Amino acid sequence: MRRANTEITATIKTKTLELLMTKNPDAIAMRDIAANCRITAANIYHYYKDKDSLFQEISLDCLRELNERILKAVHALHADKKKLRAAIDMFRDWCFENPRRAQLVMQGIRTVSDADDEFIESYFVCNKTGAELLRACIQNGNARSANPQLDVDILVSGLWGCVESVFLKKCDKKYWDNGIAYTNRFISLWMNAIFGGTK
């Protein structure tokens, strides 16, 4: 593959994401991507070995963007607990604001399983940020967790399950249009388990 031309790869990713907004990954062929980009499939293969590697790069771009939003949300806050809660809220809000992207990132785009550990770890950049925030709370004596990374991973998986149940209307009908209240309850349960409390 060629050394990446940032202008071309940016166009390829933008046009591919447009397709992913309306079609599932399995329904998109490289020729569809090429047609949408107005280039040949051979041009795309110069930069991506297959469509899965292209989809994965798009997924990583979304996660990096989300992580930047999380970091920005916590930057001005001082209390560690408030930083952690702001990060959690930002993940949840991003999912509701970008439902299709969230579905693609969390389940639609296949996570590469045969790559090296460093590449696989890059998929969990937001989880790592959350774990760092939780560790800060633990160091200050505000929280208890024997395994911060695992607890944050469980939080993200569980919170996504709640978000998805709102998307799919698999929760109580009164929350179909009030996903914030529904997910707030799950977040509170997790926060109480980590910080103590019965609310």
Image (spheres, rainbow, N blue to C red):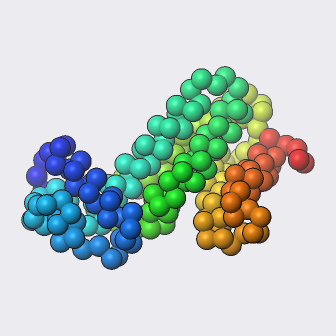
Counting the numbered discs, the total is 0
Residue 2 visible within the image: yes
Vertical arrangement, residue 24 with respect to residue 180, above or below: below
Image quadrant where residue 57 sits: bottom left
Q: Quadrant of the N terminus?
A: bottom left
Relative depth, front residue between 186 and 32: 32
Decide if residue 77 is on the left or right side of residue 143.
Answer: left
Rendered location of residue 92, percent (x, y): 61, 50
Image quadrant where residue 50 sits: bottom left
Decide if residue 72 is on the left or right side of residue 191.
Answer: left
Rendered location of residue 193, percent (x, y): 80, 49
Decide if residue 20 is on the left or right side of residue 78.
Answer: left
Residue 157 visible within the image: no
x 16%, y 49%: residue:
8
Decide if residue 131 is on the left or right side of residue 181.
Answer: left
Rendered location of residue 118, percent (x, y): 38, 50
Relative depth, front residue between 56 and 20: 20
Give the farthest residue toward the right: 198
x 24%, y 74%: residue:
29
x 28%, y 60%: residue:
16
Rendered location of residue 167, percent (x, y): 60, 65
Give the farthest residue toward the bottom: 27
Relative depth, front residue between 115 and 10: 10
x 22%, y 50%: residue:
11
